Amino acid sequence: MATAEQIKSLVRSYLSDDDERFYTIALQVAAHEAQQGHGALAHDIRDIVDKAKHTRGSNVLLKFPQELQGMVFSEKTDTPLSALVLPERFKERIGRIVHEHRQQEKLKSHGLSNRRKILLVGPPGTGKTMTARVLACELRLSLHTIQVDKLVTKFMGETSAKLRKIFDLIRDEPGVYLFDEFDAIGGERSLDTDVGEMRRVLNALLQFIEQDASDSLIIGATNNPRLLDRALFRRFDDVLYYHLPPEADRQRLITNMLANFMGEQFPWRAVLRESKTLSHAEIDHACRDSIKDAILHDESKVNGADIVKTLKERRQTHER
């Protein structure tokens, strides 16, 4: 068994959050047990240490340089591909991105590269950010969301310098990097409202994207594709266009959201009519509002009239 000193060292390293020291001592214990003829125990200890290194290492979020503090939000996601309520052909395209990333070495052996630069286009609330979360989950990578509005500054050269640091991170720290509201820095260079500094920023962005050869996934998301410079589209390996959910997807989304709160006599005709112009996110919010109302009124099921009412409220707000 482990010596008294090894046990004390294990406790000290654990309490001081010194993971590397803890792993080293644990492996020393495994070696000691192997010498004593306890091969199975030694193997179990090494296996536990290896699994712990992988699990804890995958949960460590990226620490950003001081200059980028507050501009990048880093998170681990647990949203699987099956959670997306989108047409199957669309989910197949997302699945292809995942499959190519997992088989990138096989592609490289034939002189090919996997899809790594993806542009997501569509109205708010239709699943663009959720897609980034799904890709991060499926690839077991952290999702790093770049706050584009904080990236752009009024000082000449500062925005381009920050962009360079972002792409240095993309190169050095593999992950899924989401540029939300991408049009804020990817605007058409010919726009009359554009200024010289933003043109330089866009030129720098085009170069950074084109020259990037990292193992990270770069995702741009925009609600306004007409504002994007046409040269940007050529820099992306794939462009996915999102739309408001059709009737079948709305019905599936509402069924998934209400789950056990859905009653037997459900007014689908009225529900589908009121949800016709709503996005995935707006339908999600309406369902949650109905569930909260049912709970607060001590009801086990969502009243059909209530879900129609909450959907109508969302639609009226959207139309304004």
Image: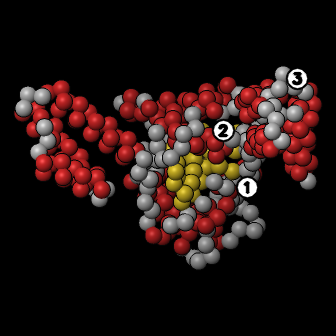
Tag 3–tag 1 contact (CB < 8 Å) = no
Reading the chain from its start, which is encountered first: label 3 or label 1? 1
| Above or below, comparing residue 272 to residue 143 in the picture | above
Q: Quadrant of the N terminus?
A: top left
| Above or below, comparing residue 100 to residue 128 in the picture | above
Q: Between residues 267 and 208, which one lies in front from this camera angle?
A: 267
Q: Residue at x 57, y 76 (%)?
A: 156
Reading the chain from its start, which is encountered first: label 3 or label 2? 2
Camera-side mark, 1 or 2? 2
Pinpoint residue 301: horizontal percent, then vertical percent.
81, 31
Q: Residue at x 64, y 46 (%)?
A: 129
Amino acid on which the number 3 mark rests in the picture: Gln
Q: Secondary structure at mark 3?
A: loop
Numbered label attached to residue 227 = 1
| Above or below, comparing residue 308 to residue 151 in the picture | above
Q: Between residues 269 and 167, which one lies in front from this camera angle?
A: 269
Q: Residue at x 41, y 51 (%)?
A: 60
Pinpoint residue 246: horizontal percent, then vertical percent.
81, 30
Tag 3–tag 2 contact (CB < 8 Å) = no
**Residue 246 can be seen, yes or no:** no
Pinpoint residue 214: horizontal percent, then vertical percent.
42, 47
Q: Residue at x 45, y 70 (%)?
A: 66
Q: Quadrant of the C terminus?
A: bottom right
Residue density around tag 3, few if under 14, some if 14–19, many if 20 or more, within 10 Å: few
Name the residue tied to disc 3: 265
Name the residue tied to disc 2: 240
Residue density around tag 2, few if under 14, some if 14–19, many if 20 or more, within 10 Å: some
Which quarter of the picture shows residue 65?
bottom left
